[in-house]
Image: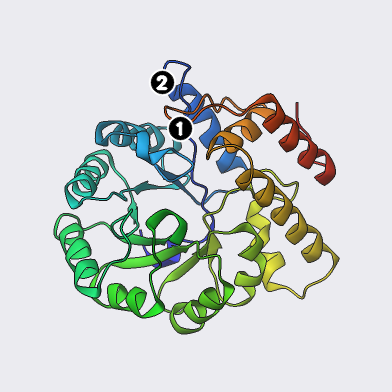
Amino acid sequence: MKKEDLHGFVPAIVTPFSETGEIMEDAFTEIARFLVARGATAICVAGDNGESWALSAQERGRLVRVLKDELKGEAKVILGISAPTIDAALAYVCAGEENGADAFLSMPQTYVLKATDAELARRFDAISANTRLPLILYNSPRRMGYSLSVDQVELLLDHHNVIGIKESHRDFFHHTHLLHRLSGRLSVMTGPCHYILPAFGLGARGFIATGPEFINTLPAELAQIGTGAPGAAYRKVHHELTVIYETLMATGTWPSAFKAALALKGLPAGAPRDPVLPATPADIARIRQAFDVLGIEHR
């Protein structure tokens, strides 16, 4: 997978679990088919939506293999390998390598207060020493406990096989400087939905975001809207992305709201895995109301 292959709609797929916690592979492939039909150019396994914290290395490898066998090249398959310890991350790398992953998505070490340049280098040196597959950085201050600076992103880009970054910082100052300095060297993929269209105009190549799969406009069409002159269609889509993102992020414990929204669309998203509880009736009513306001068809 090359930098040029990382673009457009790249969803992080849910992992459908049964009520007793088993992975439902048929449901998983059905959701993957839905995402490809919406224009996905790649699918990320074991991201935040996929409840990565609840998946073993063996399960991650199996999910990659299921997608590779199902999609047969229709979309790339990216595996999330973020973990607090390097040993866990390398176990995920091994599982991805063995099952045909096209690239890895990785935060730095998570759940620490910060990472120095030396600590970042040590982490990614170890990953790079164990794979020839390309890396997609993932900057999520809410998940990591700190943020990568633009300087740190450039440092990792200079010394590793980095082809892109999922940028989930909630500060658009950060996005602006990242895009200005580095969008020519790596694919910047937007995380927060309400930044997708503005980021396209500033050089982003796509988005790894939650919400675009639900709006009436095909996610595959957002690049054209975002790079065109802002008008009525731009404002309408931006508002839809903002409302659906706000609703999902403010409802329940992630990703229970996302799974409930998929179920409202008739997709077998299954239950969350422990310790997350399913969305409550009140949660589902809130999501249904947002769908109604936006004119999104649902059950």
Is 252 positioned to the left or the right of 66 in the image?
Answer: right
- Quick one: which residue is furthest to the top in this view? 20
Is residue 265 something one can see in this rendering?
Answer: no
| Residue at position x 66%, y 66% in the image | 197
Circle nearer the N terminus (2, 1): 1
CB under 8 Å between discs 2 and 1: no
In the displayed structure, 101 sits above or below 153; it is: above
Position in image of residue 153 (x %, y %): 35, 73
Which secondary structure, mark 1? loop
Q: Which residue is mark 2?
A: 21
Q: Which mark is residue 210?
A: none
Res. 69 image quadrant: top left
Q: Which residue is mark 1?
A: 15
Kind of residue at badge 2: Gly
- Quick one: which residue is furthest to the front in this view? 113
Res. 121 image quadrant: bottom left
Is 25 positioned to the left or the right of 207 in the image?
Answer: left
In the displayed structure, 224 sits above or below 62; it is: below
| Residue at position x 39%, y 59% in the image | 145
Position in image of residue 254 (x %, y %): 53, 40
Kind of residue at badge 1: Thr
The local crowd at label 1, few if under 14, some if 14 to 19, many if 20 or more residues have their Cα within 10 Å, is: many
The C terminus - image quarter: top right
Is 53 positioned to the left or the right of 181 in the image?
Answer: left
| Residue at position x 53%, y 67% in the image | 205
| Residue at position x 44%, y 22% in the image | 24
In the displayed structure, 266 sits above or below 251; it is: above
